[in-house]
Amino acid sequence: MGEPVTPGLGVLIVEILERRTGIETTVEMATGEAYAVFNIAWGRDMGAAWEHVTTNISPEVEGASLDFFMTDDVVRLEDPRTGETLWKKDSGAQC
């Protein structure tokens, strides 16, 4: 039997986005880009420390873009309805 999978460094970001499936979340990136995310598919490459995320793919969300990012590039998660910060880089925890 194989070794258990150890969560990557972006596991908290993935958990927050999964918990909000179907609810829009704004994901702000270090590049200044922002993505409207309704659902995610995610994984982690062998030897990688951070997870990768594909957005709005299953189910497809009409009018929402399909985006791909690495969790180490995320600087903030926000609820666009309330403006509440759900996670912020360097805070390490849900606000």
Image (spheres, grey):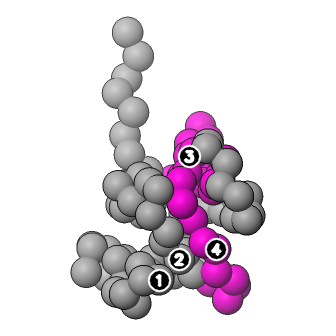
Q: Quadrant of residue 89?
A: bottom left
- Residue 26 horizontal/vertical position (percent): 53, 77
Mark 2: amino acid: Thr
Q: Residue furthest front?
A: 62
Residue beneath the point at 35% across and 55% down = 19
Q: Which residue is mark 1?
A: 80
Is 10 or 46 nearer to us in this picture? 10
Depicted 54 relative to depicted 59: above or below: below
Q: Quadrant of the C terminus?
A: bottom left
Which residue carries the number 3 mark? 42
Q: CA distance from mark 3 to mark 1?
A: 22 Å
| Identity, as a three-letter code, of the amino acid under mark 3 | Trp
Q: Which residue is mark 4?
A: 35
Q: CA distance from mark 4 to mark 3?
A: 15 Å
Q: Residue at x 67, y 89 (%)?
A: 32
Q: Is residue 34 above or below residue 48?
A: below
Report helix, strand or loop for mark 1: loop
Numbered tag placed on residue 26 in the rendering: 2
Q: Residues within 10 Å of mark 2 (few under 14, many from 20)?
A: many
Q: What is the crowding at mark 1: few (fewer than 14 residues within 10 Å), some, or many (at least 20)?
A: some
Q: Which of disc 1 and disc 3 is earlier in sequence?
A: 3
Q: Position of residue 22 (x, y in %)?
A: 47, 56
Q: CA distance from mark 1 to mark 4?
A: 11 Å
Q: Residue at x 39, y 59 (%)?
A: 20
Q: Is residue 6 left or right of residue 27?
A: left
**First in sequence: mark 1 vs mark 4:** 4
Label 2–label 4 contact, CB within 8 A: yes
